[in-house]
Amino acid sequence: MARLVKCDAPDMRSLLADVRYAVRVLVRTPAFALPVVVVLALGIGANTAIFSILNAVLLRPLPFQGQERIVRLFHVPPAATFPGIKRFSLSPANFYDWQRDARSF
């Protein structure tokens, strides 16, 4: 059975009345209530997943000491061999060759 909740604040009484009315309408029309609940669940779940990914990738600092020293190396290929391609990501084999030959890495 429903239990009567008493509140002294007028804003809280209005909120409780709105919640009671919403529950009555949703119970009376379950064909409407189910899609509403599913859409809300999907929206909340999608937002949570996207924020979790963005938080892990963009917002948190990297789990390394000296983060400001991390670099990304690229290889500029000959224009005649690869027309239109400005740069490639550096392969591990090329990196090890460069590391062997150069003293700045």
Image: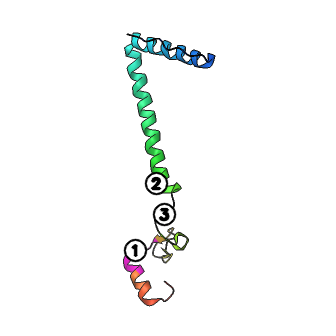
Q: In terms of depth relative to the viewer, which is nearer, 103 or 80?
A: 103
Tag 3 and tag 2, C-beta contact below 8 Å: no
Task: Say the numbered circle drawn on residue 62.
Answer: 3
Q: In terms of depth relative to the viewer, which is nearer, 20 or 10?
A: 10
Quadrant the N terminus occupies? top left
Can you identify the residue that label 1 sits on? Answer: 91
Can you identify the residue that label 2 sits on? Answer: 56
Closer to the chain start, of discs 3 and 2, is: 2
Tag 1 and tag 2, C-beta contact below 8 Å: no
Task: Say the numbered circle drawn on residue 83.
Answer: none
Q: How far, Cα to Cα, is label 1 from label 2?
A: 26 Å
Report x, y in % for residue 14.
Answer: 58, 15
Q: How far, Cα to Cα, is label 1 from label 3?
A: 22 Å
Closer to the chain start, of discs 1 and 3, is: 3
Report x, y in % for residue 52.
Answer: 45, 48
For residue 96, side relative to residue 62 (left or right): left
Nearer mark to the viewer, of 1 and 2: 2
Nearer mark to the viewer, of 1 and 3: 3
Segment tinted magenta in the rendering: 89-95
**Disc 1 on helix, strand or loop?**
loop
Report x, y in % for residue 49.
Answer: 43, 44
Question: What residue is shown at x 46% (from left), y 54% (from top)?
Answer: 56
Q: Residues within 10 Å of mark 3 (few under 14, many from 20)?
A: few
**Disc 3 on helix, strand or loop?**
loop
Amino acid type, residue under disc 3 in the picture: Leu
**Is 5 covered by the magenta stretch?**
no
